């Protein structure tokens, strides 16, 4: 069984994002970039499935600038077998990403595609679902538990009311939630070995996909700064203020 | 923790500890001289540059020697040549420009560049990797490895996945033994392994103790109308002179409408109520500094100590199996506030000595020739010229000391001798005086626009440490913070730490305890230096922890 794991290079979760002064987007100059944490969980899950003897090959794929090779190398160091980078400097929307992943999936022919439920930069939460639709395959989103069972995958989903367990026929698409696993540390020898694992770089144009944006970003703004609180002397003062702001 | 861990081992020709300018220059020089030599470089930060914090105005002299075509490349240093060099003496309300004609020529910044040292290191790391250097970021060197005869044979990387009690977690990953013919310690100021090898081999037997300053820095996006690309300003005087402390501020107009600014507080201060973080906030509120920042916004915050001992504090540089380079040794030119060029040069000289030794079949012995080559290089000439500047200012204070330091540098420049022989230092820890001798200092509250509180500031260093791990700030005696530091020295750790790691908290019934918020640690090393009884030992936390500085 083959597993395909798409990974995205995003702004590191420790970094406080800053909006560009012209409001056109987030300033990424000199900012630390890392693998999307949900995708890292997907890589870890794929490795665990392989370690359990239920998969034979893990292919990681990223779509992004040349620097995205770094996140692919991280995934290879964790234990993925080979990597593909679809190189582009364009900022792609989920639909374009899903179409490119479809092209890759048709070529790699994985039994399971496992990816993060969302990327922490744009928080779209669309790619996995769109990919499932484009490939006409079953999907198990927000997975907190994944079990391969013969020709099926049993996915425990984190839903509003609690947990929902579903059984999908392979090949299928699974998107990961935070509690699925805790990704491992890559060891130093594995980082070295990862440098020698195959990493194929191809141009976006060679995928034969129309990646033209369908959306137009009007502006990006930072959340409003929270005003400081005030101390009130007694309950009457509190009620007066609540009335003043119209909540009582 | 299992007492015997089966550790993997890898063998290299050279292991370099630390991915700053010294270590990276050494790695590049080694590969330039011999592409077949195997070089491994360890960096504790999550990536190269993550723990680098400097001004910086950089003298390109060493880079010219290392990569002569850097000016024609995409090197970030080229972007902003120093266009205007100002030296201000500050009083509480005014600033006076000191004419540069009075200063010795070595103080000129002509031909220098202002740039983020973190960005320069990231660029150097790309060059090093292209040459085949194996760079491992997120892997600290945690222990020094010795052979039976006591020679350094390499280092052990830190264990990952250890819980707060020191027990292995599910994701435990033991550190590896990396062995080498020679190990280069390029850890920066007050490196934790450097400290150990200095003690073990008594490398400071014949030099003065190293002394330090604490640099607290911010990076701001400012109003383009107020930005004057290439203008660099240094200040002395207010506010530190009010507490009899010395040090100075810097404000550099760098690329992309950003300014890098900071205040260095010499850690030899006597008054335990001195609060370097608040001194920096006060300094930013000076009308001349505030005028630059108004309408701008802060991008990043950080802190790091800088060596201020100068030439007389340079220890013996070689010992069996290893050498010290860069700020591990301490090659900062204090009045010029520059150490990048000397750090790089020392790394290059170390590389050359190591390579010659390996070629002649030697290993794990003492590279006396590296000591000699540093002492006959331009590093030595440059540092000897300024070696009394810092001690004169320390001894005679701000105004007179500065004049004497200038006179000493002029004499050395023109006639080859100074006002006195190389002057002595006392350790920073020993300078601290009892709380009773001083009065608490009242610092103004932050305004939230120019000045900020400490914890909000720490969030701009993007610091993160794995939560469940042993505290990496170790107390030799856990009674000392209360019985000595709080009782006698007014609890200085609560103020000198730029990250608020140390906090005296009530524990009920009048009892007080020291709480160590190790997760906030910026790896600046101030506590390891300034604790009056040297009771705090900084050890390396789990790899990848600490600040994630952008272009600092």
Image (cartoon, helix red, strand yellow):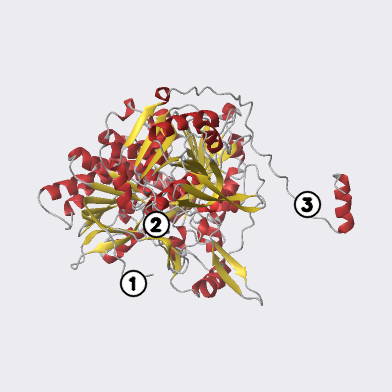
Pointer 2 indicates a residue of which chain? Answer: B
Label 2 and label 1: CA atoms lie apart by: 37 Å
Query: In x, y percent, where is residue A212?
Result: 52, 22
Residue at position x 59%, y 67% in the image: B504
Seen from the viewer's position, the closer of residues B253 and B134 is B134
Mark 3 or 1: the one toward you: 1
Q: Residue A235 occupies which quadrant of the picture?
A: bottom right
Going from N to C along the chain, the mark reached first, 2 or 1, is: 1
Circle 3 residue: A230
Identify which residue is drawn at 43% across, 36% down.
A62
* Quarter the N terminus of chain A occupies: top left
Question: Nearer the observer, disc 2 or disc 1?
Answer: 1
Label 3 – label 1 distance at C-alpha? 55 Å
Residue A96 falls left or right of residue A80: right
Image x and y of residue B366, in percent:
18, 57
Q: Is residue B107 visible?
A: no
Kind of element beneath mark 1: loop
Chain letter for mark 3: A
**Quick check: B295 left or right of B180?**
right
Image quadrant where residue B338 sits: top left
Q: Which residue is mark 1?
A: B3
Quarter holding residue B517: bottom right
The secondary element bearing badge 3 is classed as: loop
Answer yes or no: are tags 2 and 1 on the same subunit.
yes
Residue at 64%, 26% in the rendered image: A218
Q: Chain of mark 1?
A: B
**Relative height, residue A84 to residue B527 (above, below):** above
Residue closest to the eye, B524 or B161: B161
| Residue B260: percent from left, percent from top | 50, 39
Q: Dot 2: within a 10 Å radius of its alpha carbon, few (fewer than 14), some, or many (20 or more) residues? A: many
What residue did someone put label 2 on? B211
Helix, strand or loop at disc 2?
A: loop
């Amino acid at each position: 069984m083959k597993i395909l794991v798409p990974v995205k290079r995003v702004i590191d979760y420790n970094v406080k994002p800053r909006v560009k002064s012209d409001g056109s987007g987030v300033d990424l100059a000199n900012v630390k970039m890392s693998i999307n944490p949900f995708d890292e969980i997907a890589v870890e899950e794929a490795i665990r499935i392989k370690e359990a003897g239920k998969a034979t090959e893990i292919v990681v794929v990223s779509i992004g600038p040349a620097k995205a090779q770094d996140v692919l190398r991280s995934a290879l160091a964790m234990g993925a077998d080979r990597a593909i980078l679809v190189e582009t400097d364009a900022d792609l929307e989920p639909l374009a990403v899903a179409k490119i992943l479809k092209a890759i999936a048709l070529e790699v022919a994985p039994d399971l595609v496992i990816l993060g439920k969302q990327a922490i930069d744009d928080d779209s939460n669309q790619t996995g679902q769109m990919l499932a639709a484009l490939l006409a395959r079953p999907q198990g989103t927000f997975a907190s538990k994944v079990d391969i069972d013969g020709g099926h995958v049993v996915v425990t989903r984190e839903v509003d009311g609690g947990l929902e367990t579903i059984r999908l026929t392979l090949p299928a698409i699974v998107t990961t939630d935070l509690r699925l696993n805790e990704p491992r540390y890559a060891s130093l020898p594995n980082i070295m070995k990862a440098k020698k694992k195959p990493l194929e770089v191809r141009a976006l144009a060679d995928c034969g996909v129309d990646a033209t944006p369908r959306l137009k970003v009007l502006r990006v703004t930072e959340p409003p700064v929270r005003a400081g609180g005030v101390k009130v002397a007694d309950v009457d003062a509190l009620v007066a203020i609540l009335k003043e702001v119209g909540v009582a | 923790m299992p007492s015997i861990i089966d550790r993997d081992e890898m063998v290299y020709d050279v292991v370099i500890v630390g991915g700053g300018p010294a270590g990276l220059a050494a790695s590049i020089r080694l590969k330039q001289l011999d592409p077949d030599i195997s070089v491994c470089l360890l960096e504790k930060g999550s990536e190269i540059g993550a723990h680098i914090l400097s001004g910086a105005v950089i003298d390109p002299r060493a880079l010219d020697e290392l990569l002569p075509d850097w000016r024609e490349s995409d090197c970030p240093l080229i972007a902003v040549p120093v266009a205007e060099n100002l030296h201000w003496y500050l009083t509480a309300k005014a600033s006076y420009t000191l004419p540069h004609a009075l200063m010795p020529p070595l103080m000129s910044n002509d031909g220098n560049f202002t740039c983020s040292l973190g960005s320069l290191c990231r660029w150097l790391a790309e060059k090093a990797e292209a040459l085949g250097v194996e760079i491992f970021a997120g892997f600290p060197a945690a222990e020094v490895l010795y052979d039976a005869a006591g020679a350094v044979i390499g280092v052990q990387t830190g264990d990952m996945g250890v819980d707060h009690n020191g027990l292995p977690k599910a994701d435990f990953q033991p550190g590896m033994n990396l062995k080498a013919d020679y190990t280069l310690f390029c850890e920066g100021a007050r490196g934790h392994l450097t400290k150990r090898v200095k003690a073990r081999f008594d490398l400071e037997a014949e030099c003065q103790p190293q002394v330090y300053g604490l640099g607290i820095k911010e990076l701001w996006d400012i109003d383009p109308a107020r930005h004057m690309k290439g203008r660099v300003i240094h200040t002395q005087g207010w506010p530190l002179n009010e507490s009899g402390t010395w040090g100075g501020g810097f404000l550099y107009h760098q690329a992309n409408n950003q300014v890098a600014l900071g205040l260095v507080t010499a850690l030899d201060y006597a008054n335990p109520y001195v609060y370097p973080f608040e001194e920096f906030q006060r300094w930013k509120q000076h009308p001349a500094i505030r005028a630059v920042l108004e309408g701008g916004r802060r991008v990043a915050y950080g802190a790091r100590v800088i060596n201020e001992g100068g030439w007389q504090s340079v220890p013996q540089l070689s010992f069996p199996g290893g050498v010290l380079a860069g700020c591990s040794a301490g090659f900062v030119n204090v009045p010029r506030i520059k150490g990048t060029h000397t750090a790089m040069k020392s790394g290059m000289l170390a590389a050359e000595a190591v390579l010659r030794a390996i070629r002649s079949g030697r290993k794990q012995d003492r590279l006396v020739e590296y000591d000699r080559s540093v002492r006959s290089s331009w590093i030595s000439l440059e540092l000897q010229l300024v070696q009394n500047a810092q001690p004169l200012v320390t001894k005679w204070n701000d105004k007179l000391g500065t004049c004497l330091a200038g006179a000493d540098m002029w004499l050395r420049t023109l006639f080859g001798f100074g006002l006195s022989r190389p002057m002595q230092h006392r350790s920073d820890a020993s300078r601290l005086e009892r709380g009773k001798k001083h009065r608490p200092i009242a610092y103004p509250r932050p305004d939230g626009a120019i000045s900020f509180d400490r914890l909000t500031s720490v969030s701009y260093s993007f610091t993160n440490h794995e939560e469940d791990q042993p505290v990496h700030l170790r107390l030799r005696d856990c009674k000392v913070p209360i019985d000595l530091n709080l009782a006698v020295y007014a609890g200085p750790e609560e103020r000198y730490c730029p990250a608020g790691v140390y906090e005296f908290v009530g524990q009920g019934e009048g009892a007080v305890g020291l709480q160590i918020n190790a997760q906030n640690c910026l790896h600046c090393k101030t506590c390891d230096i300034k604790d009056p009884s040297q009771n705090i030992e900084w050890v390396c936390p789990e790899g990848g922890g600490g600040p994630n500085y952008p272009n600092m």
